[in-house]
Image (spheres, helix red, strand yellow):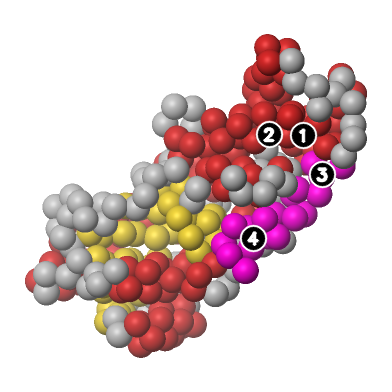
């Protein structure tokens, strides 16, 4: 099964709320009322839904769309219109070493995602170093070590040490060894844990001390099942760590896949890039974000 098929399958619970609308319905005000309810239920959010519906109604009127299938494709196009500015490849060739700092709440899939990205980079012949700056959770260090062993990648870690010191040592080592990429894992934390959120700032500054301009990316790993809670996470983590991008995981089986639209729309003309989306545990289940493929899967259109 290809990635688009897995994405479409993963977003089934989101899509099922929309599917019935496009099965022989009459395109009238009742149709748009039901569509509004379905979009909000998919966690697209009230304001993005209002914007999409207004544009959609204008398109229907201007182009004389009459069938539900025509409206479905117009809906897809409006979702792509919002998401496309967030479609941006992760360019690790801007610096050497290129330093990535990963953050997220507990259980978002951060450490697993780092392992997958390390594998992706190694397969592109990039030399990588991992920093286990989650010094609180032994399982996180062990998990990162396993990914390192699988991909023949070194891991810098300390038991019970200072996370900022681990990050500093890793970036310094990456620079001294002329490696291509350093990826720093940080402990999962809730946005309400102010002391731990402030620690992210210290970790960021420690990397800048080790290498001017580092970290070059501060990426928040977001659990796609969190729905509208993800909006608050993005806002708070951005305030403490100055985010530069997102990775959205666990889109397989969620009814809240529309949150990507809400997150992108919430940033106005400065959306955070969504570098990758994940639909499962396998290596190939993490892929670069594609706005059209995601919108197709969301509304139930076969890839075209």
- Observer able to see residue 108: no
Q: Which numbered disc covers residue 19?
A: 3
Judged left or right of residue 192, residue 184 is left
In the rendered structure, which segment of residues is drawn in magenta? 1-20
Image label count: 4
Name the residue beneath numbered marker 2: 73
Using the numbered discs, state the Cα–Cα distance from disc 1 to disc 2 in whole angstroms: 6 Å
Q: Is residue 19 above or below residue 218?
A: above
Judged left or right of residue 67, residue 263 is left
Quick one: label 2, few (<14), some, or many (20+) residues within 10 Å?
Answer: some
Q: Is residue 282 above or below residue 245?
A: below
Using the numbered discs, state the Cα–Cα distance from disc 1 to disc 4 in whole angstroms: 20 Å
Kindly identify the residue that appears in the image at 56 percent across and 35 percent down. 80
Q: Position of residue 193 (x, y in %)?
A: 52, 55
**Which of these two is toward me, 292 or 171?**
292
Label 1–label 2 contact, CB within 8 A: yes
Name the residue beneath numbered marker 4: 5
Quick one: label 1, few (<14), some, or many (20+) residues within 10 Å?
Answer: some
Q: Earlier in the sequence, mark 3 or mark 2?
A: 3
Using the numbered discs, state the Cα–Cα distance from disc 3 to disc 1 in whole angstroms: 11 Å
Judged left or right of residue 282, residue 259 is right
Instruction: Give the SS element for disc 4.
Output: helix
Name the residue beneath numbered marker 1: 69
Instruction: Give the SS element for disc 3.
Output: helix
Kindly identify the residue that appears in the image at 44 percent across and 43 percent down. 87
Q: Earlier in the sequence, mark 4 or mark 3?
A: 4
**Which of these two is toward me, 117 or 29?**
29
Using the numbered discs, state the Cα–Cα distance from disc 4 to disc 3 in whole angstroms: 17 Å
Instruction: Give the SS element for disc 1.
Output: helix
Which quarter of the picture shows residue 66? top right
Q: Nearer the viewer, mark 3 or mark 1?
A: 1
């Amino acid at each position: 099964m290809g990635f688009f098929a897995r994405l479409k399958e993963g977003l089934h619970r989101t899509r099922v709320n929309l599917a019935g609308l496009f099965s022989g319905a009459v395109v009238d005000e009742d149709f748009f009322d039901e569509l509004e309810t379905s979009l909000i239920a998919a966690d697209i959010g009230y304001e993005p839904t209002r914007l999409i519906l207004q544009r959609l109604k204008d398109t229907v009127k201007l182009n004389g769309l009459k069938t539900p299938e025509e409206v479905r494709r117009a809906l897809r196009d409006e979702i792509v219109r919002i998401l496309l500015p967030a479609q941006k490849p992760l360019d690790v060739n801007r610096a050497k070493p290129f330093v990535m700092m990963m953050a997220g709440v507990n259980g978002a899939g951060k450490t697993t995602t780092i392992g997958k990205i390390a594998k992706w980079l190694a397969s592109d012949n990039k030399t990588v170093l991992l920093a286990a700056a989650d010094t609180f959770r032994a399982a996180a260090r062990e998990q990162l070590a396993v990914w390192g062993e699988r991909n023949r990648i070194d891991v810098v870690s300390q038991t019970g040490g200072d996370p900022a010191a681990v990050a500093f040592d890793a970036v310094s080592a990456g620079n001294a060894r002329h490696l291509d990429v350093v990826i720093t894992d940080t402990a999962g934390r809730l946005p309400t844990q102010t002391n731990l959120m402030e620690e992210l700032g210290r970790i960021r500054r420690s990397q800048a001390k080790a290498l001017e301009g580092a970290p070059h990316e501060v990426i928040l790993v977001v659990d796609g099942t969190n729905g509208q809670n993800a909006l608050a996470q993005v806002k708070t983590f951005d305030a403490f760590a100055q985010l530069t991008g997102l990775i959205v995981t666990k889109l397989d089986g969620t009814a809240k896949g529309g949150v990507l639209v809400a997150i992108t729309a919430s940033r106005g003309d400065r959306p955070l890039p969504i570098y990758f989306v994940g639909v499962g545990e396998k290596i190939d289940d993490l892929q670069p974000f594609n706005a059209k493929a995601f919108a197709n899967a969301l509304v139930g259109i076969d890839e075209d």
